[in-house]
Image (cartoon, rainbow, N blue to C red):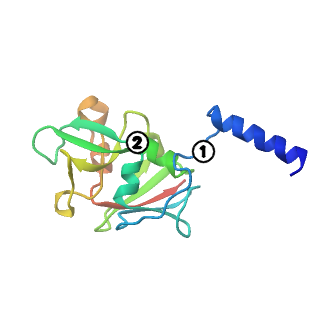
Amino acid sequence: MSLLRAGMRAMMIVATVLGLTSAPLLAEMAQPSGNVILTVTGKIGETNAEGAARFDLEMLQDLPATQIRTTTIWTTGEKTFVGVSLDTFLKAIDAQGSHLRATAINDYAVEIPVTDAAPGGPIIAYLQNGEEMSVRNKGPLWIVYPYDSSSDFRTEVIYSRSIWQLDRIVVHD
Protein backbone atom coordinates (compact mmCIF):
# COMPACT_ATOMS: atom_id res chain seq x y z
CA MET A 1 0.00 0.00 0.00
CA SER A 2 1.41 3.37 -0.95
CA LEU A 3 2.12 5.97 1.72
CA LEU A 4 -0.52 8.28 0.22
CA ARG A 5 -3.17 5.53 0.22
CA ALA A 6 -2.28 4.59 3.84
CA GLY A 7 -2.59 8.22 4.89
CA MET A 8 -5.98 8.59 3.21
CA ARG A 9 -7.18 5.41 4.87
CA ALA A 10 -6.03 6.68 8.28
CA MET A 11 -7.88 9.99 7.72
CA MET A 12 -11.06 8.10 6.77
CA ILE A 13 -10.82 6.00 9.94
CA VAL A 14 -10.37 9.11 12.09
CA ALA A 15 -13.28 10.86 10.34
CA THR A 16 -15.49 7.82 10.88
CA VAL A 17 -14.57 7.54 14.55
CA LEU A 18 -15.25 11.24 15.06
CA GLY A 19 -18.57 10.98 13.21
CA LEU A 20 -17.48 13.37 10.48
CA THR A 21 -18.82 11.31 7.63
CA SER A 22 -22.35 11.35 6.30
CA ALA A 23 -22.44 7.56 6.06
CA PRO A 24 -25.91 6.03 6.00
CA LEU A 25 -27.31 4.34 9.11
CA LEU A 26 -27.01 0.91 7.54
CA ALA A 27 -23.33 -0.11 7.32
CA GLU A 28 -24.10 -2.29 4.33
CA MET A 29 -27.69 -2.75 3.37
CA ALA A 30 -28.77 -6.26 4.23
CA GLN A 31 -30.94 -8.45 2.05
CA PRO A 32 -34.49 -9.04 3.27
CA SER A 33 -34.95 -12.51 4.71
CA GLY A 34 -38.72 -12.19 5.12
CA ASN A 35 -41.50 -10.88 2.91
CA VAL A 36 -40.59 -7.57 1.27
CA ILE A 37 -43.09 -4.98 2.53
CA LEU A 38 -41.44 -1.79 1.22
CA THR A 39 -39.49 -1.10 -1.96
CA VAL A 40 -37.77 2.24 -2.52
CA THR A 41 -36.44 3.34 -5.90
CA GLY A 42 -35.36 6.55 -7.57
CA LYS A 43 -32.69 8.92 -6.31
CA ILE A 44 -31.20 6.83 -3.51
CA GLY A 45 -27.60 6.01 -2.72
CA GLU A 46 -28.11 2.79 -0.75
CA THR A 47 -29.56 -0.27 -2.46
CA ASN A 48 -29.74 -4.03 -1.97
CA ALA A 49 -31.33 -4.89 -5.33
CA GLU A 50 -30.92 -3.54 -8.85
CA GLY A 51 -31.73 0.15 -8.38
CA ALA A 52 -33.84 -0.46 -5.27
CA ALA A 53 -33.77 -0.71 -1.51
CA ARG A 54 -36.06 -3.53 -0.40
CA PHE A 55 -37.14 -3.91 3.22
CA ASP A 56 -38.80 -6.63 5.22
CA LEU A 57 -40.30 -5.85 8.62
CA GLU A 58 -37.18 -6.93 10.51
CA MET A 59 -35.00 -4.54 8.52
CA LEU A 60 -37.30 -1.63 9.34
CA GLN A 61 -37.31 -2.66 12.99
CA ASP A 62 -33.50 -2.65 12.95
CA LEU A 63 -33.54 1.10 12.31
CA PRO A 64 -33.96 3.43 15.32
CA ALA A 65 -37.61 3.36 16.42
CA THR A 66 -39.78 6.39 17.11
CA GLN A 67 -43.08 6.35 18.99
CA ILE A 68 -46.02 8.70 18.45
CA ARG A 69 -49.08 8.85 20.71
CA THR A 70 -51.87 10.61 18.85
CA THR A 71 -55.44 10.50 17.71
CA THR A 72 -56.24 10.19 14.02
CA ILE A 73 -59.31 10.97 11.96
CA TRP A 74 -59.44 7.29 10.90
CA THR A 75 -59.31 5.62 14.32
CA THR A 76 -61.11 5.93 17.65
CA GLY A 77 -59.24 7.29 20.66
CA GLU A 78 -55.56 7.88 21.19
CA LYS A 79 -53.26 5.30 19.59
CA THR A 80 -49.57 4.55 20.01
CA PHE A 81 -47.70 4.11 16.75
CA VAL A 82 -44.14 2.81 16.52
CA GLY A 83 -41.99 2.98 13.43
CA VAL A 84 -38.95 4.59 11.89
CA SER A 85 -39.04 8.36 11.49
CA LEU A 86 -39.23 9.40 7.87
CA ASP A 87 -36.18 11.58 8.52
CA THR A 88 -34.11 8.62 9.77
CA PHE A 89 -35.37 6.36 7.00
CA LEU A 90 -34.41 8.79 4.23
CA LYS A 91 -30.93 9.14 5.71
CA ALA A 92 -30.58 5.35 5.86
CA ILE A 93 -31.25 5.00 2.13
CA ASP A 94 -29.28 8.15 1.28
CA ALA A 95 -32.29 9.79 -0.38
CA GLN A 96 -31.18 12.51 -2.78
CA GLY A 97 -34.44 13.91 -4.15
CA SER A 98 -36.83 16.59 -2.96
CA HIS A 99 -40.09 14.60 -3.18
CA LEU A 100 -41.41 11.15 -2.44
CA ARG A 101 -44.09 9.38 -4.41
CA ALA A 102 -45.58 7.05 -1.83
CA THR A 103 -47.83 4.31 -3.19
CA ALA A 104 -50.14 1.87 -1.43
CA ILE A 105 -50.90 -1.76 -2.17
CA ASN A 106 -54.03 -0.68 -4.10
CA ASP A 107 -51.96 1.79 -6.22
CA TYR A 108 -53.27 4.89 -4.39
CA ALA A 109 -50.37 7.36 -4.47
CA VAL A 110 -49.46 10.66 -2.81
CA GLU A 111 -46.63 13.15 -3.13
CA ILE A 112 -44.74 14.02 0.05
CA PRO A 113 -42.09 16.73 0.07
CA VAL A 114 -38.85 15.64 1.70
CA THR A 115 -39.15 18.74 3.89
CA ASP A 116 -41.86 16.85 5.83
CA ALA A 117 -39.13 14.42 6.91
CA ALA A 118 -37.92 16.49 9.85
CA PRO A 119 -37.27 15.52 13.46
CA GLY A 120 -40.63 15.41 15.23
CA GLY A 121 -42.39 14.73 11.93
CA PRO A 122 -43.96 11.63 10.40
CA ILE A 123 -42.96 8.02 10.90
CA ILE A 124 -43.34 4.93 8.79
CA ALA A 125 -45.38 3.07 11.38
CA TYR A 126 -45.27 -0.72 11.61
CA LEU A 127 -46.95 -1.11 15.02
CA GLN A 128 -50.21 0.27 16.36
CA ASN A 129 -50.76 -0.19 20.10
CA GLY A 130 -47.95 -2.74 20.19
CA GLU A 131 -49.38 -4.91 17.39
CA GLU A 132 -48.34 -5.33 13.79
CA MET A 133 -50.91 -3.81 11.46
CA SER A 134 -52.66 -6.15 9.05
CA VAL A 135 -53.66 -5.01 5.58
CA ARG A 136 -57.24 -4.89 6.90
CA ASN A 137 -56.03 -2.55 9.66
CA LYS A 138 -54.17 -0.07 7.41
CA GLY A 139 -50.90 -2.02 7.47
CA PRO A 140 -48.42 -3.32 7.25
CA LEU A 141 -47.02 0.23 6.94
CA TRP A 142 -48.69 3.58 7.50
CA ILE A 143 -47.16 7.06 7.29
CA VAL A 144 -48.37 8.67 10.50
CA TYR A 145 -47.81 12.29 11.49
CA PRO A 146 -47.92 13.44 15.12
CA TYR A 147 -51.35 15.01 14.55
CA ASP A 148 -51.95 16.00 18.18
CA SER A 149 -48.59 17.73 18.60
CA SER A 150 -49.43 20.74 16.40
CA SER A 151 -52.30 22.18 14.39
CA ASP A 152 -49.83 22.20 11.47
CA PHE A 153 -50.34 18.42 11.31
CA ARG A 154 -54.14 18.66 11.30
CA THR A 155 -54.72 19.89 7.76
CA GLU A 156 -56.26 18.29 4.70
CA VAL A 157 -52.87 18.34 3.00
CA ILE A 158 -51.20 16.42 5.84
CA TYR A 159 -54.12 14.01 6.13
CA SER A 160 -53.81 13.30 2.39
CA ARG A 161 -50.12 12.42 2.85
CA SER A 162 -50.92 9.92 5.62
CA ILE A 163 -50.92 6.93 3.32
CA TRP A 164 -51.61 3.49 4.74
CA GLN A 165 -50.90 0.09 3.21
CA LEU A 166 -47.69 1.74 1.97
CA ASP A 167 -45.55 -0.60 -0.10
CA ARG A 168 -43.55 1.61 -2.54
CA ILE A 169 -41.68 4.89 -2.47
CA VAL A 170 -39.98 6.65 -5.38
CA VAL A 171 -37.54 9.40 -4.43
CA HIS A 172 -37.43 12.12 -7.09
CA ASP A 173 -37.01 15.87 -7.69
Report the residue that reaches farthest toward the left.
76
Q: Is residue 93 left or right of residue 156?
A: right
Q: Nearer the viewer, residue 12 or 69?
A: 12
Residue 169 image offset from top left, x and y in percent: 43, 59
Residue 139 image offset from top left, x and y in percent: 24, 58
Specify the amino acid type for callout 2. Answer: Pro
User: In which image quadrant can residue 18 be found?
Assistant: top right
Q: Which mark is residue 128?
A: none
Residue 62 image offset from top left, x and y in percent: 40, 49
Q: Residue at x 17, y 57 (%)?
A: 137
Query: 170 above or below 68?
Result: below
Q: Residue at x 21, y 40 (%)?
A: 80
**Disc 1 packing (10 Å; few <14; some 14–19; many ≥20):** few
Specify the amino acid type for callout 1. Answer: Ala
Q: Residue at x 27, y 60 (%)?
A: 165
Q: Which mark is residue 23?
A: 1
Q: Is residue 52 left or right of residue 68?
A: right
Q: Nearer the viewer, residue 25 or 156?
A: 25
User: In which image quadrant can residue 37 be found?
Assistant: bottom left
Query: 136 above or below 118?
Result: below
Q: Secondary structure at mark 1?
A: loop
Residue 64 image offset from top left, x and y in percent: 40, 42
Mark yes or no: residue 154 visible: no
Q: Is residue 165 left or right of residue 88?
A: left
Q: Which residue is mark 2?
A: 64
**Disc 2 packing (10 Å; few <14; some 14–19; many ≥20):** few
Q: Secondary structure at mark 2?
A: loop
Q: Is residue 4 left or right of residue 156?
A: right
